[in-house]
Amino acid sequence: MIDRRVFIAGPLALGVAGALVPAQAARPVRRELWTFDDLQTVAGEPLKLVGAPRLMDSPWGPATRFDGVDDALIVGEHPLAGAERFTVQALFRPEGGAFEQRWFHLESAETPSVAPGTGSTRMLFEIRVVGDRWYLDAFMTGAGYRQTMMAPTKTYPVGEWHHVAQTYDGQTYRSFVNGDLQMEVDTPFVPQGPGQASIGMRLNHVAFFRGAVREIRFATEALASTQFALPKATAPLAHS
């Protein structure tokens, strides 16, 4: 599988005699794309399978489907480790099931004695399912901060593909569904350390997800909603 990780240089600045030189104060922006179109690797990283996730068709190619009982993937990487600002985007298809589903989990490996999934430094995408609708729960916690972003009145249909995102710009934490702002709140943030990720469950093997995930995108910058990688009109997304 092709390594899909892309690293983008930081902004340029005018130097002596108007020459373009790298801006010294700006850190390079890292961008990474995880596409779940096989069950062996993602972006060059090996996948550890939990249960029996399988591939299914999506409007954009293969995606990985989880049964909501014991299916998940584990990746030995935290793509946003060290980031002071970030964007996480995902393209997924919830299919109902249990009320609480923690379907994407990034966690820092703080100490060897802490069991995966129980650490105090993590980021998550979760959903809450109510009948044939769902709403987003974006969450992050670490040293000096803990923020939950839920808007229970903003619900979306199950059984359809949706785009979700969360961003942090150095001051404000925001969450989005299909490009529409869900919540925003000013909050402190401390960059997280290296660790691992799970897709389809929380890392401690609870709150399994019923549905499919096509891709997750990471950037060490806060993108505006107009910059999101929303799917083309050939596969429209549902709005509330």
Image: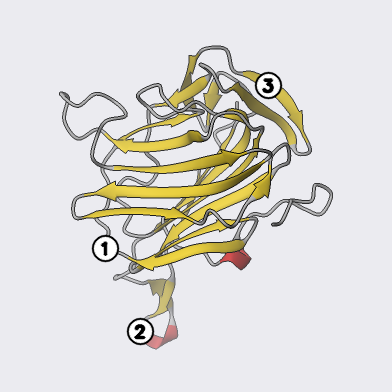
Give coordinates of residue 213: x percent, y percent: 61, 34
Residues packed near mark 3 inside 10 Å, few (<14), some (14 to 19) or many (20 plus) = some
**Labelled pair 2, 1 in contact (Cβ < 8 Å):** no
Residue 9 visible within the image: no
**Labelled pair 1, 3 in contact (Cβ < 8 Å):** no
- Image quadrant in which the C terminus is located: bottom right
Give coordinates of residue 192: x percent, y percent: 27, 47
The residue singled out by tag 2 in the image is 16
Q: Which residue is drawn at 64% across and 54% down?
A: 229
Of the pair 16 and 131, the residue shown nearer to us? 131
- Image quadrant in which the N terminus is located: top right
Q: Quadrant of residue 53?
A: top right
The residue singled out by tag 1 in the image is 188
38 up-or-down from 168: above or below = above
Whichever of labels 2 and 1 marks the residue nearer the N terminus, that label is 2
Whichever of labels 2 and 3 marks the residue nearer the N terminus, that label is 2
> In the drawing, what numbered circle is on residue 55?
3
Q: Quadrant of residue 58?
A: top right
Question: Three-letter amino acid code at disc 2?
Answer: Val
